[in-house]
């Protein structure tokens, strides 16, 4: 797709905004519609758009295979680990109330971290699956 | 939506079928907004319309774009579908009416979520509170499902540097490999 | 008349569901089958979401000016179901691509014929 200059220019302008929107959805999900799942998918969509316009090899240079593998694991561990931190601080598994001094503060922090874990996992999975399907996953 | 669903049945070009299924998802997302499920509509629009269509197109480009003409009669499947549909329709007669605030689904644990989550969790979006806190185990398991699906896709289709894929006909290297083995 | 209006959403869901079911059992092409599964899945989602609707209720995001909300529990279930759905779709498509690599066909009846021939 190297000849489509309109697509290249427009996508170059748009990709940062797509990522910014993904982050907004991720961190504003507590107050409005949105959350980890949606943010992860939108974030992955930014990389997929880049790969479609500029070619999969270039996209793989931006986001190497090891990076997505590590993201995949970090996301799941962040979620499961938050549960264990709750145990060590004297609560039940996945009980966020123990994470901070106040109950709502702890819940807020717990939900924030857990949603972040979900978002990272979803984004990494979607990017991995896309690259695998385009046959460029080395 | 019904029209689109029947168009998917009729059309034999797989690319068109996939595009129609994207339109189907988009219509569903619009319907969710109308029913007040903004979070779900958001997810459906991002996942069902964007990523699913993309994956289908990628799969078609790796396989084939045309469905072959049917060889055997389709009377039997049609009969099964009609009978199942009749049974389901009969079953709906006992269901609570649309929008009924006293339906069992709206009574059990839900009022507590709506009344208490504001104080207990302190977040205005009840869907997020229930998703991440009250039903945290569900979401944890679900994250693992996604993780596993990603791993499975890698196992099935990933092309590692020294990966020998048995039975792969499009790769000429296989012949040499088999001799080595 | 009230029954017809009150149950209309379920009947619409049944029609969509059966359309998806028909695609799954009547078509031989595996990709078409996955599309059919998606249609079926969306019908189930619509079923759950339409149950969560309460007359006069708004989206379940707490605010001082609202008192009636839709039921948030089906929303949560369907939210996770959509993402699990995309995961299974991705897995199914990966398997189909792999089948095509090995057998050069993605038509169900031809796969059966190949299997019979192999004994």
Image: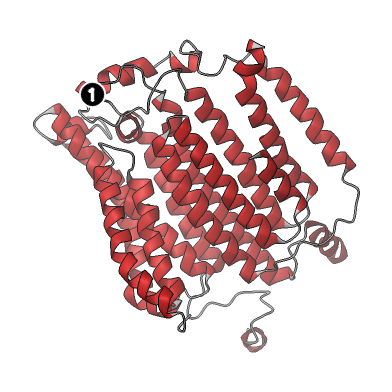
Q: Please provide percent x and percent y for residue A52.
A: 46, 72
Taking the spot 47% from the left edge, 32% from the top edge, the residue there is B34
The quadrant of the picture occupied by the N terminus of chain C is top right
Q: Secondary structure at mark 1?
A: helix
Taking the spot 69% from the left edge, 78% from the top edge, the residue there is B169
Quadrant assignment, res A34: top left
Q: Is residue A136 visible?
A: yes
Task: Judge whether A6 appears above or below C37 on screen.
Answer: below
Q: Please provide percent x and percent y for residue C109.
A: 83, 57
Taking the spot 26% from the left edge, 18% from the top edge, the residue there is B116
Looking at the rendered structure, the number of numbered marks drawn on it comes to 1
Quadrant assignment, res A94: top left
Judging from the image, mark 1 belongs to the subunit labelled B
Q: Residue furthest front?
A: A6
Horizontal relation, residue A95 to residue B41: left or right: left
Q: Please provide percent x and percent y for residue C40.
A: 64, 40
Horizontal relation, residue C49 to residue C24: left or right: left
Along the viewing direction, whichever of B129 and B101 lies nearer the viewer: B101
Along the viewing direction, whichever of B133 and B81 lies nearer the viewer: B81
Disc 1 designates what residue?
B118
Task: Judge whether B33 appears above or below B86 on screen.
Answer: below
Along the viewing direction, whichever of B82 and B19 lies nearer the viewer: B19
Task: Judge whether B100 appears above or below A111 on screen.
Answer: above
Horizontal relation, residue A65 to residue A108: left or right: right
Q: Residues within 10 Å of mark 1 (few under 14, many from 20)?
A: some
Q: Residue furthest left?
A: A101
């Amino acid at each position: 797709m190297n000849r489509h200059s309109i697509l290249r220019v427009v996508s170059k302008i748009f990709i940062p905004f797509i990522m910014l929107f993904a982050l907004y959805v991720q961190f504003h999900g507590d107050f409005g519609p949105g959350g980890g799942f949606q943010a992860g998918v939108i974030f992955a969509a930014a990389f997929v758009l880049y790969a479609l316009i500029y070619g999969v090899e270039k996209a793989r240079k931006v986001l190497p295979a090891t990076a997505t593998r590590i993201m995949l694991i970090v996301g799941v561990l962040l979620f499961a680990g938050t549960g264990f931190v709750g145990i060590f601080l004297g609560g039940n598994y996945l009980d966020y109330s123990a994470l901070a001094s106040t109950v709502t503060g702890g819940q807020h922090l717990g939900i924030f971290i857990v949603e972040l874990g979900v978002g990272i996992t979803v984004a990494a999975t979607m990017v991995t699956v896309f690259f695998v399907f385009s046959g460029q996953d080395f | 939506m019904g029209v689109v669903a029947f168009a998917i049945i009729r059309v034999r070009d797989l690319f068109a079928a996939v595009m129609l299924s994207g339109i189907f998802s988009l219509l569903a997302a619009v319907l969710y907004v109308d029913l007040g499920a903004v979070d779900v509509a958001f997810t459906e629009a991002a996942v069902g319309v964007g990523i699913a269509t993309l994956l289908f197109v990628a799969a078609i480009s790796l396989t084939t774009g045309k469905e072959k003409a049917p060889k055997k009669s389709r009377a039997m499947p049609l009969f099964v579908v009609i009978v199942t549909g009749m049974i389901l329709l009969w079953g709906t007669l006992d269901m609570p009416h649309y929008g009924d605030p006293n339906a069992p689904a709206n009574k059990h644990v839900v009022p507590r979520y709506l009344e208490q989550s504001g104080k207990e969790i302190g977040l205005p979006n009840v869907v997020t509170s229930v998703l991440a806190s009250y039903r945290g185990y569900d979401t944890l398991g679900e994250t693992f499902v996604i993780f596993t699906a990603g791993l499975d896709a890698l196992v099935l289709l990933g092309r590692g540097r020294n990966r020998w894929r048995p039975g792969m006909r499009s790769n000429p290297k296989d012949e040499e490999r088999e001799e080595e083995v | 008349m009230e029954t017809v209006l009150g149950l209309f959403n379920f009947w619409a869901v049944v029609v969509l569901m059966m359309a998806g079911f028909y695609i799954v059992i009547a078509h031989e092409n595996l990709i078409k089958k996955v599309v059919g599964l998606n249609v079926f899945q969306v019908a189930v989602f619509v079923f759950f979401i339409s149950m969560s609707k309460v007359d006069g209720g708004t989206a379940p995001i707490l605010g001082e000016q609202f008192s009636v909300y839709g039921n948030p529990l089906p929303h949560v279930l369907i939210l996770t179901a959509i993402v699990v759905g995309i995961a299974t779709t991705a897995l199914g498509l990966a398997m189909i691509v792999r089948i095509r690599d090995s057998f050069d066909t993605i038509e169900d009846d031809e796969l059966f014929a190949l299997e019979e021939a192999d004994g």
